[in-house]
Image: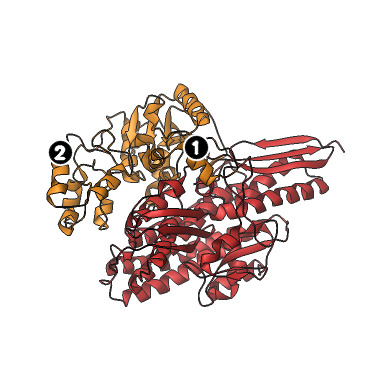
Amino acid sequence: MHKGTTFEKLKIASFDFTCCEGCQLQLANRESTLTDFLDLLDIRNFREISSEQHNDYDIALIEGSISRPDEVERLQAIRRQAKTLVAFGTCACFGGVNSLKNRFSLNELAVEVYPGMEVETGLVKKISEVVKVDLSIPGCPVNKEEVERIVVSLVTGSQVTLPKYPVCIECKAQINTCLFDLGEICLGPITRAGCNAVCTTGKTPCLGCRGPAEEINMAAFLELVKERGLSENDLREKLAFYNAFEGLYQP
Amino acid sequence: MKHDFALNIHHLPRVEGHADIKITVRNGKLVDARWAIVETPRFFEIMVKGMSAERVPFLTSRICGICSISHALASIRAIERAMSIEPPAAAEKTRLLAMQGETLQSHALHLFFLVAPDFTGTGSVLPMIHSHPDLVRAGLQLKELGNEISSVTTGRCTHPVSLVVGGVSKAPEKEQLLKLRAMILERKPALDTACSFFQSLAIPDFKRETEFISLFNGSSYPSIGGRLISTDGVNRDENDYLSMTNEYTRDYSTSKFTKLSRESSVAGALARFNNNYLLLHPKAKEMAASFGFQPVCHNPFMNNIAQLVESLHILEDAEELINSLLDMDLRNIKTTYTTKAGSATGAVEAPRGILYHHIETDAAGKVVKANCIIPTTQNNGNIHNDLWAITEQALREGKNDREIEKLCEMLVRSYDPCISCSVH
């Protein structure tokens, strides 16, 4: 894409917190475009793949949520350095599946999993609860194609945008049978697109990892579930799965 | 002897997750060596409580960004065994193929991105794009192939979409399978390139006798389910996972430790190789022979070669799995079931070794209790003990601080630890 144009590589770093590192791993996927993708980047710090670590980056990708005091300090130091701090993936953007822990007492869970040992753990927070976030890229995991597009936008200085419409639109474009018609609750009607409806195309209901689409009609969605006589427990379990619909329904 | 030093590698690079290596030497004598995992715990065993069994694989797959398919399938197997659900044959074959894809992807990531730079003297794979273009191309081809197998069988390469309790929600299309088979044939030469590279390397000469644990079924190289066996002669039922692991904690590590017949043991490619050598594809055995590699091998650095040998086995086995899927009716892929109360263990050979999920459900199909024991957890004790032994050997050989540091880093990397997974 950059033949005949000059550009400056992005001085980028990638850091992970409470997470599975699956989003960072996507950076090394889509192998056929990988060398072109890496040509756009000057990787200054990426512990998972490199022993070379420098702290003169401009862009910091943050994967994971925050659940321990040492993570807060580490994140604040990154914030002081980064010109653009990116919440990278669903855990960073919304807390992600880790937030399911917050339903339990911290003391009880530590005692049950680590009997006889002191383990430090706190309530799970999304990145924006700890530091200012400049850009959010949701997804569990992030969609590498979307990440490539965003990186190109950052290199060329054009505006970064995410689809405003819901997953439903992408799903219908693939001529899938609607999962609601098969008796399943699917969060496709209220979730932000950009994943190419990967789950529903695999005949699995959307669990909303990309968070709410813009201008969703939550009341109509809840009414639809009720009208079809679908399970309220199932609905709550799905809405709570990634903590991405916090505040939009009564848990 | 002048030797007095403290080695403190904070957040070891080129491994998955956060862990430190600490070595203290006084007057040339090793006084402390430790493998300290400092990763933040996520408490998956608690998160899963109260969740519907059908949703569990979607949650537990998030334990790991590299071996999400293994986690989904360990949960699915535990739940299906707990509820006496028999998935259709085509679903079982699809799952086996998915496991092969994931392991190939994981081995390629480890061998080319994480291990190779130790031998080329670069800090990462990035400079190797220019210094070793053929090797990097080969690595990317194999990794992409692994990811493609996972995508065709599970809907995408990380965090599978279509692996569900009862079978699979969507079967691979025959056209995709044909393409995949052609891709495997086309990419076999990439493994020759990798093999030549690893044959040219001086693998560190170190061994410490230990016990190797893996699954065993007697008829095929292990993947999903089977007996739990060890090179010390242990042979138990899959549900006896607790007596195979005997988990304990150490206050400096958020990842637990396990042991069986000795003070520590090993899971992973080398353990599978040592326990299941006879079940490898003949071509994989030939490759092993070209390295003079035979069971039972006690050199942990040979885990890298075991991964390479397994990669060849995977290419051959995946081709056979695709052939049998092409002959099957791919419409019958999911069994309907009624939830019931029960409990069982699901054991699978994740890329890094034997992975156990034990799940207990109530009559409504909600999870009452869960326990996950991760391959890296089962290697922590051995990594720790090897760090002592290798440092002592290096001191005897008169190695300097920097050489010892590099050797310790390489030792840990050879186990391919998956740290956030082990803390879960």
Nearer to me, B55 or A37 = B55
Q: Which chain is in red here?
A: B
What percent of the width, then of the height, locates residue B78?
Answer: 43, 62
Q: Nearer the viewer, residue A185 or A230?
A: A230
Q: Chain of mark 2?
A: A
Question: Is the residue B368 above or below the residue A142 in the image?
Answer: below
Which residue, as the protein is rendered here, is positioned at the far right? B1
Other residues around mark 2 within 10 Å, as few (<14) / some (14–19) / many (≥20): few
In terms of depth relative to the viewer, which is nearer, A188 or A225?
A225
The one nearer the camera, A60 or A110, is: A110
Amino acid at the residue labelled 1: Asn
**Label 1 secondary element:** helix
Judged left or right of residue B262, residue B86 is left
State the residue at coordinates (70%, 51%).
B385
Q: Earlier in the sequence, mark 2 or mark 1?
A: 1
Q: CA distance from mark 2 to mark 1?
A: 36 Å
**Which residue position is annotated with label 2?**
A219
Tell whether label 1 touches label 2 (CB within 8 Å).
no
Mark 1 neighbour density, 10 Å: few (under 14) some (14–19) many (20 or more): few
Say whether mark 1 and mark 2 are on the same chain.
Answer: yes
**Amino acid at circle 2:** Ala
Image quarter in which the N terminus of chain B is found? top right
Report whether B52 appears left or right of B267: left
- Rendered image quadrant of residue B338: bottom left
Give the numbered dot on residue B79: none
The disc at residue A107 is 1
Q: Position of residue A187 (x, y in %)?
A: 23, 46
The tint of chain A in the picture is orange
